[in-house]
Image (tube, helix red, strand yellow):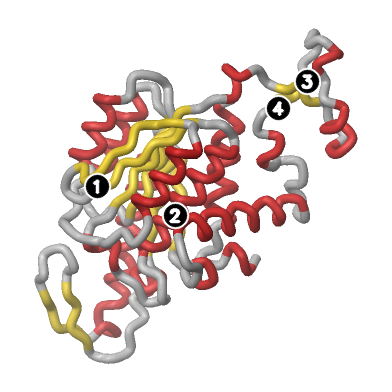
Amino acid sequence: MKLLAPEFVAKLSNMELKARTIVEGFIVGLHKSPYHGFSVEFSEYRPYITGDPIKEIDWRAYGRTDKLYIKKHEEETNLRSYIVLDKSASMGFTTTGITKLEYASCLAGALAYLMIKQKDAVGLMLFDRDVVDYLPPSATKVRLFELLARLENLSAGGETSIRLPLDKLSESVRRRSLVIVISDLFDEPEETISSIKRIHFAKSELIVFHILDPAEKTFNYREEAIFEDLETGRRIQTQPWVLRGDYQKKVREFADKIRYELRDAMIDYIPIDTSTPFELSLMAYLYKRSKLL
C-alpha cells in the first residue's frame, strides 16, 4: 500500500517512475487481495462461453483462477480512451503536500501506463477555460512517453470552463470510446452535468473522478484567515468556525447534485480526495473496462 500512497508517489523523481510505481504496486496488491485473478494479465481474456472451441481455453489461466478463460482476438481487446485533465488554477490547491493537479497528473499517468500495458489506445486533453493541449489516442509506447512528458511538471493556471473543452471533444469522437474526466469540477454544476451527458449521449462511456483536497470538504480551519480564489484573485476575511456548518452543507449539496445527475444517467462518478491511495481509482477503471469488453 505504500506504493499507492500519494505522499510517497509525489516524492518520486519523474512521471514515468510515478506511473510505473503506482501500476506495479496496484498489480501486486491485486494478487494479494480477494480480487486475485481480476488483474491486468487477464485484460486480454474473457470468460469461456458454452460453444467456444475448447482448444482456445487458456489452461494456465484456469490453473491460477479455477475459471475458464478464452484469449480474446485483437479486435476484442482494443479500447479507445481519452483522459480529460483539468489544469485550471483551482487545481493548484493543497493542504496535504500534494496539490490536486499533482494527484490528478499521477492518476492520469498511471491510467495511461495501465492502458498501454493492456494494448489499449489512450489520448490526453488538458484544459482550463479551453483546450490547452491535446494528444489523439494511440496504443504505442511512444504515445505513452509523449503523454507522460506532457504531465511532467504540469502547472496549474487559468479559470475553469468544463463545457467548452468537453463540447470540442464530443465533436471529435467518432466511435464508441471511454472518456475519463479528472477535475475538481469547480464550474457551474448545470453546465458541467450537461456537457458530460452530451458526450455520454454520443455513445461514449464515462468515468468522472471528482478530486478535492480534504480541507475543501471539512473546512477544518481553526484560526481567522483570508481566503483567496485562485482563479479570480478575489479575497475574503473570515472566521472559519462560524462558516463551517454552512460551508460543509454547500459542498455536500454541490457534490450530491453532480453525483445524482451523473449516476442517474449511468455515468460512473468517483469522488476522491488527495489523501486517498490510487488503488480506488485504478480499481474503478478496471471494473469499468471489464464491463465494456
Closest to the camera, between mark 2 and mark 1, is 1
Q: Is residue 143 above or below residue 216?
A: above
Q: CA distance from mark 3 to mark 4?
A: 9 Å
Residue 127's disc is 1
Residue at 23% across, 57% down: 88
- Looking at marks 2 and 3 on the same chain, the residue that comes earlier in the sequence is marked by 3
**Mark closer to the observer (2, 4):** 4
- Mark 2 Cα within 10 Å, few/some/many (few <14, many 20+)? some
Residue with the mark numbered 4? 45
Residue at 34% x, 32% y: name it. Answer: 136
For the residues labelled 1 and 3, the Cα–Cα distance comes to 42 Å
Sequence-wise first label, 2 or 1:
1
Report the mark closest to the observer, 2 or 3: 3
Taking 160 as reference, is 96 left or right? right
What quarter of the picture does the N terminus occupy? bottom right
Tell me the distance, in whole angstroms, between the alpha carbons under discs 2 and 3: 34 Å
Residue under numbered circle 2: 271
Asked whether the viewer can see residue 136, the reply is yes
